[in-house]
Image: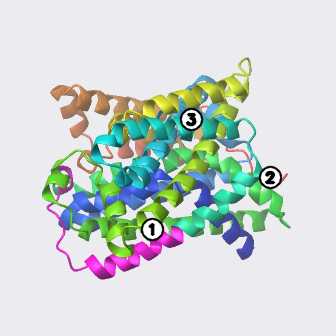
Amino acid sequence: MLKKGVLTGLLLFGIFFGAGNLIFPPTLGAMSGKNFWPAISGFVLSGVGIAILTLIIGALNPKGYVYEISKKISPWFATSYLVALYLAIGPFFAIPRTATTSYEVGIAPLLPSNMTGLGLIIFTVLYFVSAYLISLNPSKILDRIGRILTPVFAILIIILIILGVIKYGATVPQTASTEYAKAAFGAGFLEGYNTLDALASVAFSVIAVQTLNQLGFANKKEYISTIWIVGVVVALGFSALYIGLAFLGNHFPIPADVMASDANKGVYVLSRATQAIFGPTAQIFLAVMVIVTCFTTTVGLIVSTSEFFNKTFPAIAYKTYATVFTLIGFAIANLGLETIIQYSVPVLQILYPIIIAIVMIVIVNKFVALSKIGMQLTVAVVTAIAFTSIIGQQFKLTALINIINTLPLAQASIPWLIPTVIGIVVSLFLPNKQKSDTFEME
């Protein structure tokens, strides 16, 4: 049981490991200054805790999140939300980000500054053509490469962290940016959204179930125990990696002009720390490892997103979806990493509270019956709060911002949490109650 859990946990760690897991922790470290620990605590809670809980709940669900959301909320909401979720972890955010991160971490430091724009176009053409061709006939070879190279790359990152802490651990951190100076935990919690891991857990929980079923289990108890071991393995791995990368970013000396610029601080720390610790030639090795690791993720995302859309809307062929999503990813990748991050943030701040609320409802419903009307109202309220918050921020609407700020925990960037809890409690007393499906081994 322990062996099965550890092996599956390592596999899922490799699947999760991508661009966001690399660049956002050191960025947080650089921006949080002396408020590092509350900031990284918020980041780990949303980037690891919620993601792993979502994964475990999905793996315990015999029919997946689409069934749970359809039954508890409504089929049209399940389809609408999951379409938005797959577009986020697919062509609009994660796919272009893997390509752009590969370029900015691995290739851009090797090029003259006046060549970076043209270099990005050439690189992404080659990158996406290769990814598209493989996605049309995904093979086990690619999967095996990803399983081998991702753990190797993770080990190298750990070595970088250890040597970096030894070399720069005594360096005084930068001054905290405005958001981290005001509410470090909340800013870190929101930064954890950028990893996309909680959203990806909805899709990856299916992979977890398939992998665990292949291993075989004597009974339901052994299966459930193994799922929790998987969760612990992945959570410990990512928490250690995130804290280490963030600590390196917190203490690595970043020039004032870089801190003041729009340059991604995580990319800067990774590239410069690698060169400073291992020498200039290490950049070539870093480039190969980052590109291959991100490339396997890109292919996997193209395949999984295309398969979801083909299954949901079968009138259009898988190949057509793969073509369209590859072209969208290519176009958005050429906007640059910082642009991708900036336009993704508002969308993630809407999608994340909803999936967290759904996971909370699923967990409670496994123990007690809940009213369908109450569950619908809970998700509706959370969705309304998320939309209102983002509209207020994006359009500088003071009235909407003030409304959100009156909610408990608004200063911690989680104004939807207490309304979610209240909604679940109310669901205990409203009519039309339903019990969660009993988990059964197939």
Residue 283 horizontal/vertical position (percent): 41, 63
Which residue in the protein does label 3 denote? 86
Q: Is residue 9 left or right of residue 415?
A: right
What is the basis of the colouring in this image?
rainbow
- Toward the bottom, the furthest residue is 166
Q: Position of residue 298 (x, y in %)?
A: 57, 44
Q: Which residue, given by chain and number where applicable, does mark 1 sit on?
A: 241
The image position of residue 379, as x and y in percent, is 48, 34
The amino acid type of the residue labelled 1 equals Leu
Instruction: Give how far across and how far down residue 171 sits, in percent.
Output: 20, 75
- Most foreground residue, 271 or 41: 271
Q: Determine whether the residue tagged by mark 2 lies in a helix, strand or loop.
A: loop
The residue carrying pointer 1 sits among few (fewer than 14), some (14 to 19) or many (20 or more) residues within 10 Å by Cα, namely many
Task: State how far apart marks 3 and 1 are (Cα).
Answer: 26 Å
Distance from Cα at disc 1 to Cα at disc 2: 35 Å
Locate residue 307 relative to residue 90 in the image: left or right.
right
Q: Does the magenta stretch include residue 168?
A: yes
Mark 2 burial class by Cα count in 10 Å: few <14, some 14-19, many 20+ = few
For label 2, the residue is: 440
Foreground of the two, 432 or 138: 138
* Viewer-closest of 82 and 20: 20
- Disc 3 packing (10 Å; few <14; some 14–19; many ≥20): many
Q: Which comes before the other along the chain, label 2 or label 3?
A: 3
Which residue occupies 38% across, 54% down?
110
Q: Main secondary structure of the magenta part?
A: helix
Q: CB of mark 1 within 8 Å of CB of mark 2?
A: no
Above or below: residue 431 compared with residue 439: above
